Amino acid sequence: MRKYYQEEIECASPEQIKAWQDERLVKQVKNVYENNTYYRKLMDEAGITPDDIQSTADLHKLPFLTKNDLREAYPYGLMSRPVKDCVRIQSTSGTTGRRVVAFYTQNDIDIWEECCARAIVAVGGDEDDVCQVCYGYGLFTGGPGLNGGSHKVGCLTLPMSSGNTERQIQFMRDLGSTILCCTPSYAAFIGETLHDMGFTPDDIRLKAGIFGAEPWTEEMRRDIEAKLGIKAYDIYGLTEISGPGVSFECEEQTGMHINEDHFIAEIINPDTGEVLPDGEVGELVFTSITKEAFPLLRYRTRDLCVLSRKKCSCGRTHVKMSKPMGRSDDMLIIRGVNVFPSQIETVLLKEGYTPNYQILVDRINNTDTLDINVELTQEQFKEYNDNVEGYEKKLAAAITTMLGIRPKVHLLAPKSVVRSEGKAVRVIDKRKLHD
């Protein structure tokens, strides 16, 4: 079994990684300044020229990029290669405003797929594996990225996309799928459907899952692992930077190795922009140092996490990022309290409930309200039927202990919460609709 896809890169010395980053950053800054009027304007306004950037030590001098810049420059304003050199676009879902459209040269795609291949090998994948990709295809980066990575490794690839879950399980059983790639919420739904169809993990051959594109907790990881009889691994990426494979978990399952030969990561104070030392919680910022068509420098992801350079038992030397702990922009502030959905999910799973839930926030008579709909299993529904109110109060108390504010909990019948075959809609904030 292969342990690394590109050992000489994944296990390179810190000195070698820094040398790559220094050289590639200098080249990239010169590239965008000379080939992109939007970047040149930003740098000119900041009083920065390419000569001011001699190594990664100078990275902090560059201005930040945000999603607003991408919307303002839509569609071609942040391209650093002519259209004739580009072979593909990918795009965000774009629920509000303009979509984010990212462009790729063939070399960009090759690098992206290599990053995804590293992730597949890190979870034990090789040419003998059957990789079932249930991320969405099309404009969404999940399907194309893992599909390409699976090809690079040499796996038999099942390009299933999401949906038709019973057919997913049929293919999984008939073709002996060993690696599952999808969102964590869909993995949980597959496990639930497997059980409803009368099967157990012993009836499938899955050994590992690569799950990303939405927040999920350690409790949800253990729940998925139990339902599918696998080891569940995290993967991170965003369309603006390339897609999944910016970072990935190894056998330790203690954070995701960032592919530092292609991306420089920083952690900043989201309020001041100050760069924070490793080990402190802050907002993740990425700089693409090898991307050709759509290289973003100091892009603010809005994801909150921690970087760690602690030696990893897997042998990889690239810095690790923690699982995102929330976001600096869509964090819920309810009655003055910062609330992350992951906190609520942690309590639900610790108290023995399913990860099928929905958070509803509203403002009534100038007061914020917090309602949490939680779906019961068939067994719980029968057991709790005579005292639902008591169980609701008990769960509400546990959530109050975590959050510091009291929600109204509603325990619902099985299948009451709408299932998602893509990204789960966990939060409905009606206050935004009123504003």
Image (cartoon, rainbow, N blue to C red):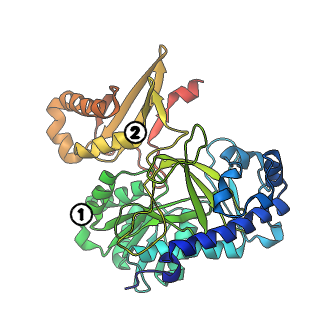
Percent of width and height locating residue 323: 43, 54
The disc at residue 408 is none
- Give percent across and percent down for residue 89: 70, 63
- Kind of residue at disc 2: Gln
Q: Residues within 10 Å of mark 1 (few under 14, many from 20)?
A: few
Taking the spot 42% from the left edge, 39% from the top edge, the residue there is 340
| Residue linked to disc 1 | 198
- What element does badge 1 sit on? loop
Q: Residue drawn 29% across and 73% down? A: 204
Residue type marked 1: Gly
User: Toward the viewer: 5 or 317?
Assistant: 317
* Residue at the image position 31 percent from the left and 59 percent from the top: 224
Left or right, residue 267 beside residue 191: right
Give the answer, above or below, for where 283 lies relative to 18: above
Q: Point out the image quarter for the C terminus.
A: top right
Left or right: residue 195 compared with residue 118? left
